[in-house]
Amino acid sequence: MVTSLSRIKAIVSKELLQLRRDRMTFAMVVMIPLIQLILFGYAINTNVKDIPVAVVDHSQTALSRILVQTVSATNVVKVTDYYYSIEQAQTAIASAKVRAVLFIPHDVANRLAQHPTVGFGLPDGSNESLVRPIAHWLVDGSDTMVASSIKSLRNMPLAELLDKPANRTYPTFETTLFYNPEQRSAVNIVPGLAAVILTMTMIMFTSAAIVKEQERGNMELLITLPLSSLELMIGKVVPYIFIGFIQLFIILGMGKLLFHIPFGGGLVALVVATFAFICASLVLGLVLSTIAKNQLQAMQMTIFILLPSILLSGFVFPYEGMPKAAQWLAECLPATHYLRLIRGIVLKDVNLISMSSDLLWLLAFTILGLAVAAFRFKKTLD
């Protein structure tokens, strides 16, 4: 058969016309690269700044206050809380209220007087074995980028206090990393991977749920059944809840076996948090299925949700490094809240009461989303 350019041109014209009529596909063609450009160019920032930290000041002197101001002036950290004891500070780190704590001992003035500097050596009469860091950082090591940023302050020069350059042989601050002292990336990635995979599969499965029934011609049968819209929506999502738990235990089980991921939390807390997240993700998929006209559009909308969930939730890039607008958008995504929950439970053994705000947000999102999906489904039937 001889190839005809006119026939090829006709097919091309037909495809272009069909693409123009398919507004959802055309919107994805434009929006996906646009969103990625904005996220990577504006929202994603590997240079972490304004990390929320707390201070435990046992000195309560002008010197300690100047030390806090000097640390804040680096813009790497931002002091958001003050605590009276180390125990309170550790609880705040575990519940992710702060990412690190600066502990200033009562003898900070003596430590500063004994601290050597470049070109000046030890002060007269000082014993090298007695030289101690001026203060102490307690850091949440579960996020390796945040931990590395705070560790960069270890040899921070204190020009305002010493009026001399720092000595790297004798660090300014001592640093202790909690939850991931070896700074292994797998410890941070594996729990977060559970959030990403569940987001992708749960939304993908249910985003095509209603559309699939329409394409198979089963919608007329569903209409005639004595089911309310809400009952149908619940029946659609229940089987996938079990699939979600199977995926979770595969990820965490293999993570424990292959990468030696510590599991310090309670199983009940993990099940409750995961159940809330799976329900929120499934309901979001149902809402998308009431919007999509076919399974291709449902897949496109899934990608539209998945990309921000990966990039803005804190899975790859630190939440603290994003601008406020991106953080507000991240707070709207279920993955952001579940990421805090699963890392807190698995790595830090935090109870759900300490992270109740994230859990309640997921439950509220599920209820609202289920109501929207049921309303839109009824509207479609009309």
Image: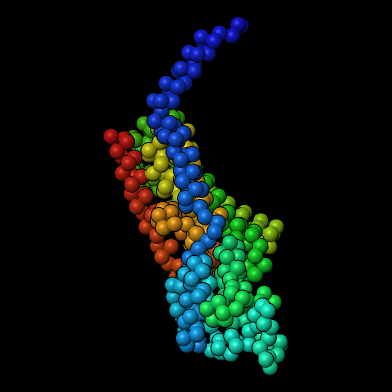
Q: Identify which residue, 74 or 309, lies in the foreground.
A: 74
Judge by depth and name the residue closer to the eye, 268 or 72.
Answer: 72
Q: How is the image coloured?
A: rainbow
The quadrant the N terminus occupies is top right
Quadrant in the rendering for residue 28: top left
Which residue corresponds to the image point at 56% horizontal and 87% vertical from the top-left? 108
How many circles with numbers are drawn on the protein? 0
* Left or right of residue 376: residue 202: right
Residue at 51 percent of width and 52 percent of height: 44
Image side of residue 131 versus residue 233, left or right: right
Q: Position of residue 226 (x, y in %)?
A: 33, 40
Which residue sits at x=52%, y=78%?
A: 160
Q: Is residue 363 visible?
A: no
Foreground residue among 65 and 143: 65
Q: Residue furthest top?
A: 2
Question: Measured from the top left, where is residue 362 in percent x and y?
Answer: 42, 58
Q: Quadrant of residue 360?
A: bottom left
Relative to 277, say whether 209 is above or below: above
Instruction: Report the front residue among 131 and 102.
Output: 131
> For this view, does 260 lie left or right of residue 163?
right
Picture coordinates of residue 31, whole percent (x, y): 44, 38
Task: Identify the image quadrant of the C terminus.
Answer: top left
